[in-house]
Image (cartoon, coloured by chain):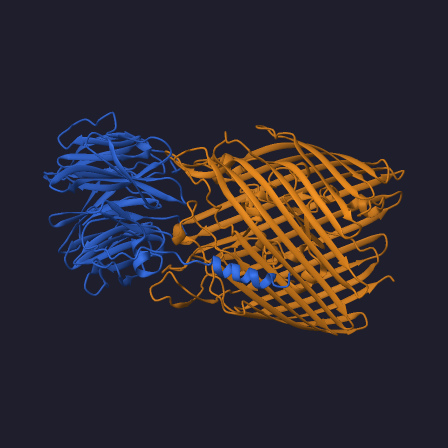
Chain colours: A orange, B blue
Amino acid sequence: MPEVQLSEIKISAYRNIFFKEDKKIFHFDSLIFETNKHLSLGEVLNLATGIAITQNSPNGISSILLRGTSANHTSVQWNGLNINSLTTGAADLSIIPVDAADQISITEGAAASLYGSGNFGGAIDLNSVAEWNNRLTLKLSTEYGSFENLKNAISLKIGNAKCQYHFTFLNHFAKNNFSFFDSYKFGNPKVSQTHNETENQAILQSIFCLLPNNQRLESGLWLQKKSTNIPAIMGSYQESSQEQTDKTLKFYLKYSFFVRQKNSFSLKNGFLQDFLYFSDKNSKIDSKFLTKKFLTNLEYTFFYSKNFIFDINIDYKYLNADISAYQKLKTEHQFGFSTGAKWTTKICVTNFSLRQEFYEKNHSTLLFSIGSKFEIVKEKLFSRINFANQFRNPTFNEKYWEPGGNPNIKPEKGWNFEIAKEYFFENKKNCKLFIDLTAYYSTIYDFIQWIPKTKFWSPENVKTLIIKGIENSIHFDMKFSKIFIKTSANYRFTISETAENYDKNLDFTGKQSIYVPIHSFQTQIYFSYKNFYLSYNQTLTGKRFTTADNNEIFALPFYSLSDISLGKTLIFKKLSVDFQFKTRNIFNVSYQIIRAYAMPLRNYSFRISFMFHNKNS
Amino acid sequence: MKYLPVFLVLFFLYSCEKSDENSQKTDFSSGIIITNEGGFQKNNGSVSFFDTKNDILRNNIFDSVNKRSLGDVVQSFAAVSGKGFIVANNSQKIEVVDLKSFASIGVISPFSYPRFALGVNNSEVWVSNGKFQGKIYVIDVKTLKIKDSVDVGFGPEVLLQVENSVFVANSGGWGSDSTISEIDVVSKKVIKTHFVGDLPVDLVSDSQKNIWVLCKGKPSYYAGGKTQAKLVKLDSQTKQISLNFDLGYSEMNPLRLCYHYENVYFGGADLGGIFKMSEKNTEIPKTPFYKQEGTQQIYAFEMADLHSGELIIPTLYVLKVKSFDSNGILETVNENSVVLKTYSAGIVPNGIWFY
């Protein structure tokens, strides 16, 4: 069983991660990071897990529909700070580079008692982690691909046993002028995409310091600017003039200390600023959205014994949105109070957590989560069970957008039940097998949707959504002499349907949520021999409806995409050089992730990376 | 377990069903077309054909016949010389179909923002175009080419032909306007600009060839604040405003106007319903002929005679919207405001076209 250790690492672990052995968690391993370098978080999630991601062009706005929910039902946490948009409640995964974190994990159906509002689907944790035995790691890489896609990255990690500093610079330019078959035009002509350029620069820095007397200081800074031209939809006869620029500044400072091996205190402050500029010359539109979040978090953890730990957490948020559509500056204060406990025995870990959120209007219900992971067959078969309630406070747009915003809208509520089996097998010849089979059932009451009203379109609590599904993951690793094979497969069966519409004029009972495939499947096979490697990835996405009444005519059909990478790594003592050639969409499939938005056919890229690594042995 | 991937692939292939479309051969030469604009940027606009003989509303007829989607924001329809002209606003095109089979015979493009089409005679279709400063394009029905254009006001919308003049409602588009352009059909010149009220959106003529204009008024989100919707009558002789009624305030839902047997019908969801008044009245009615109720919003309407055997039944056709992403409805309503029947239309139905 996972053993709780009273170590420095645990002091620094975020409580969201600390209290969730009972949940399904997908960790990105080093192979995923290495084979998908330079991609956005949205792209990697789809490639590595088969999770439904919507995206309106290769570098366009990207949203996650985790476990049949909407984009604003999954939070993205950067070192414990929720970085979802204050206005829409969703995170644009296209602007989050996978290189932005040292560890990435996805918790499906994450508990609101740990993560707060808006996690019906789950939560994605991006964490920066210090490697204390690192002395110097320098990585340089450049990639050039089809459609004038140029990506460069520099990463530096330097430090000693007491202090570590990380620096990452990313630069990406793409013309994205790919060809596609425009099935919405007469004769299904092959045309070239226009007005689809993107430019993205990011700088990330982290510093970790171990101070005397079990004190620790850590800080992170993330600066990014992304400018994207938004192409016209398929079937259009006029070039788009829409452009979007996103600028973000994220910062946090965390101080923690440990007293007498029993008590841990931490104080974290964060500041997040997002600026979005949207323009459309053809429509004479210039819109600016500036939002700021100030966050403070105070946490106390008591290590009563090796087997019992509990914590208390208080957080405060000041939210500020300067958006012309809100007519005036909107601000909110939010408080949260949480507590959690972990009880570990030889065969079981049980987590329990509670949270109450206080808003200026509509406080949350008392949020709770209880779950266990227990051993059935020693070191081979485990079972997980979890029950939690959920909550989503309406977004700023839903409350304040003029015209139509609804200040009296109720929050969404619901609950989630999950049961799972995990099977491990490992033999002496270095064969590893892991199988996870998870079933879940969840509800969302008072689901919020924009609907036409007299005078305006307005958000309303329109329905109850029931989501149920089965997820199966299989991972198999084998090492034989100089051959290493790593395979994984993920299958998802997702029913996300309306159980009841509160307005009988909008009766979509039994209809599947839009863009949520009932079936999806992903598999990856990685093969390496000496310094050569080959990676093959296939995703299958089932039919998706694009209308609430599940009109077959407007449904998007099943599609399957295949990517292949071939590479060689040359190692010269502490320096390694990696060459990789990748072909994406090798079978030249025409497909749309969002209806009417074109995606590229077969395309190629070549990457060369240098890494110098000096560790303290 | 080793057969699991094979099973999954077969399972997916099996789930990839093709939609079973209506293969019935229908003659679309004359009848009633409903345009359904669809969701913005979803390319799911469509047209429906109201088969009055069989009392069936056939949806997605363009898609069924031509095996492709019609376009984005399908705005209007006109029938001229056996050809149907379907304006797809956000696809910046006009799809031209053979009226008998509804098979596509061409695409006219590019426009910047096409809105409404009018068959002025057997050889010309006029199309209003523009988000801001607008134009009327003259299209040759035979060659399907733009052969002329006329500059008009901001955001030209509905076109109305009265004898040798075409009147254009300059709705303001994405800006603001308060005029009607009067164009001579022969010279294709603007012969007069009539000032009416803020954002004129619809036009009809009455038995005396007076022009009735429905002005939407500025919604509350316009700079300078909101103004009242108005119903304005332009006298056919003097070409001056002879009646001017304040109707209250409207916001985002469309307002419409139609004429039938010496009565003017006007309104929309934002005004509380559809009002009926005699063309001879000098006061507007206070209660609607058809009331806006519930959450399905009135989006368009027309009054026409429904031929049922030898019976002629004056019928109000009302189109209503449920949501951005689901089918709307068509209601037929009799002269006593009683709903006769409800039909499922396409997504966001916005216009009824008799031809």
- The answer to whether any part of residue A237 appears in the image is yes
Q: Nearer the viewer, residue B49 or B159?
A: B49
Residue A487, image x, y percentages: 67, 63
Residue at the image point whose x is 53% and y is 37% from the top:
A396
- The answer to whether any part of residue B196 appears in the image is no
Residue at the image point whose x is 40% and y is 41% from the top:
B323
Residue B30, image x, y percentages: 18, 52
**Vertical comparison of A448 with A429: above or below:** above
Which of the image's four quarters has the N terminus of chain B? bottom right
Quarter holding residue A366: top right
Q: Nearer the viewer, residue B128 or B197?
A: B128
Q: Nearer the viewer, residue B259 or A69?
A: A69
Q: How many marks?
A: 0
Q: Is residue B309 left or right of residue A528?
A: left
Quarter holding residue B108: bottom left
Residue A289, image x, y percentages: 53, 44
Q: Is residue A465 left or right of residue B194?
A: right
Q: Is residue B148 left or right of residue A316?
A: left
Residue A123, image x, y percentages: 64, 46
